[in-house]
Amino acid sequence: MRIKRVAAVAAVAALALGLTACGGDDGGEGTGAGSKSFAAGSTMEKLNKAQKIKVGTKFDQPGFGQKGLSGKPEGFDVEIAKIIVKELGIPEDKIEYVETPSKVREDVLVNGNVDLVAATYTINDKRKERIAFAGPYYEAGQNILVKKDDTTITGPDSFKDGTKKVCSVTGSTPAETIKQYVKDVGTQLVLFDTYDKCRDALKGGQVNAVTTDNVILLGYIAKDEASFKLAGSNFTKEPYGIGVKKEDNDFRTFINDTLEKAVADGSWKKAWDDTAGKFGAELGAAPTINRY
């Protein structure tokens, strides 16, 4: 009898082990490495086995990536990164966020300091020379932030008379774009490493305006409506993508598939509604993924 009981217990244990090994693959928070299956040697497999990931994002972009009370960045870019990480089967608490200002976004990917970059990262051909993009997952547009009582600046053409200073961030697309509208780049264009410094310079009177993407500026307005407003309409289109290493086509395809899935299942819209959408910015239709 004792032998039969031992055998029965062993059989139950084996059955339980088998059920555990065949667990689901929902990729939810706390899901272990065994719950996902990826091609051998792929970036997805390596990250899943490591059960950790480094995400480059910004810490000074209201609504997209701004360090919150938790000490971690919060915003739409951050939520999009979390969606990708979940699909990799990595717990959310295993994400290491690396502050990634505009001027170093390509560098951190090329040097292997991060695994992906989600940082209001406009897709363009110059950047594609060094890295690759998945997406886009959102399309913004460049605009101008001025003081609430300023009536002299109504759009980018207002800088052509050479009398007004505009601030932007080193290495950003907006900084390059605004150069075609200023009379004297050397004296009119003021560059910092973060937009927070530009905002402070505007508030302190050191510059007359700040220029970057509309959704970022709307975040500043939402936090200080008494001080700031937008001057005019958007004057560019800025498709935001996820940066990865240039040669990693499989990882880029995986992220593109994940972004399309997020749009279909509603998690993309929820990410927006919980973050930048609170500032009054329009989400619009999901942009078509560019599988170049």
Image (tube, rainbow, N blue to C red):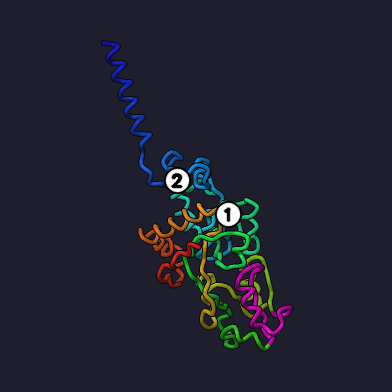
Position of 58 relative to 30 (above/below): below
Image spot of residue 84 (x, y percent): 46, 53
Instruction: Please give the name of the residue rendered at 31% of the width and 16% of the height, measured from the top-left corner.
Output: 6
**Magenta span includes 166:** yes
Circle 1 SS class: loop
Image spot of residue 202 (x, y percent): 63, 76
Residue 120's image quarter? bottom right
Relative horizontal placement of residue 152, taking residue 38 as reference (left or right) = right
Residue holding disc 1: 247
Q: Amino acid at mark 2?
A: Gly
Instruction: Please give the name of the residue rendered at 73% of the width and 79% of the height, measured from the top-left corner.
Output: 187
The circle drawn on residue 89 is 2
Residue 158's image quarter? bottom right
Residues under numbered marks 2 and 1 in contact, where contact means CB atoms less than 8 Å apart: no
The circle drawn on residue 7 is none
Magenta stretch in the rendered image: 162-188
Relative horizontal placement of residue 220, taking residue 285 as reference (left or right) = right
Residue depth check, mark 2 versus mark 1: number of the one nearer the observer: 1
Counting residues from the start of the chain, the first of labels 2 and 1 encountered is 2
